[in-house]
Amino acid sequence: MKNNYFKKILIIGFGLIGSSVARAVKKNNISREIYAIEKNDQVIKKCKKLRIVKQIKKNIKEYSLQFDLIIICSPLSSYKNIFLELNTYINKKTIITDVGSTKLSVIIDFKENCKNKNVDFIPSHPIAGLEKSGPEYGFANLFNNRFCIITPFNKKNESLRKIKKFWQIIGMKIEIMDAKRHDRVLAMTSHIPQLIAYSIVYTANDLEKHLKNEVIKYSAGGLRDFTRLAGSDPIMWRDIYSLNKEPVIEMLGRFTEDLSTLQKAIRNNDKNFLETTFNSTRKIRKIIEKLGQAGTFDPTEKKK
């Protein structure tokens, strides 16, 4: 099943995720021919030096061949133009999937802009990544034991079966979910924590100079971990907050209420409430550890 599962694969966007997908495809012999599209000249130079793909070009129109699978790994704001280009480029049955962190906006973009009947779009979200960006940081095992949420229009689609198998071959656990539900869940599990990280690091940066220097100098595990998140790709996160606005605002409202409750408990020295709250959150951490989803999944991270 692994060997040449897809004859020709095109990856659009060749940063951390795109290059990791290419490496995983190569490692697992999913396809002999991997191609890429990347608009950034510096990234193209890095890609050519790494020799992961057969060819890399700036635009899909520069390719004279057709592909069996196209994986969109570029920022969410680029999807509309990509779907428009696929209208005129694709002339044979082709499966399209993506790695975007929001799904409802992606589906709307596709339905409004891609009318090509040869295109079968199966939206995916492999929940994997690092705060680093660029093809030089990619690695084949990035997706091992991580979850991939797929939000298909048609659950009885043969292309869906192929995409499920594709992500499974490179090591992922598959979940099928409604796009709207995906966006609400990810708002809480990913988008709000990221926003909190940006906010805390911004606050630390805005302190008086002498205090700011000490905060940075003595940053222990807590602040250090937040700076790791805050070091993530700003364009990617700009797009996520712009396109998943309503679920993020909803979950942010809930978080703000809970934070106010904790603030009140600290002000009133309500030790019982604080201890009960902290104990309940420890239980959540243990559940995450049991699911094997703890840690950064960075191969350079020292294992305990």
Image: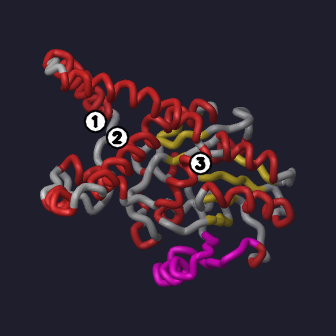
Residue 54, how many percent across, how many down?
Answer: 60, 77
Dot 3, how many residues are within 10 Å of its Cα: few (below 14), some (14-19), or many (20+)? few
Name the front one of labels 3 and 2: 3
Residue 104 location in percent, x, y?
66, 40
**Residue under circle 3?**
242
Say if 201 sits above or below 258 in the image: below
Q: Earlier in the sequence, mark 3 or mark 1?
A: 3
Q: Is residue 66 above or below residue 275?
A: below
For the residues labelled 3 and 2, the Cα–Cα distance comes to 27 Å
Question: What's the distance in space between the residues labelled 1 and 2, CA to CA?
Answer: 6 Å
Q: Residue at x 25, y 30 (%)?
A: 286
- The total number of labels drawn is 3
Tell me if residue 37 is in the magenta stretch: yes
Magenta segment range? 33-60
Residue at 31% over, 51% down: 203
Give the amino acid type for the residue marked by disc 3 in the picture. Ser
Residue placed at 22% from the left, 21% from the top? 265
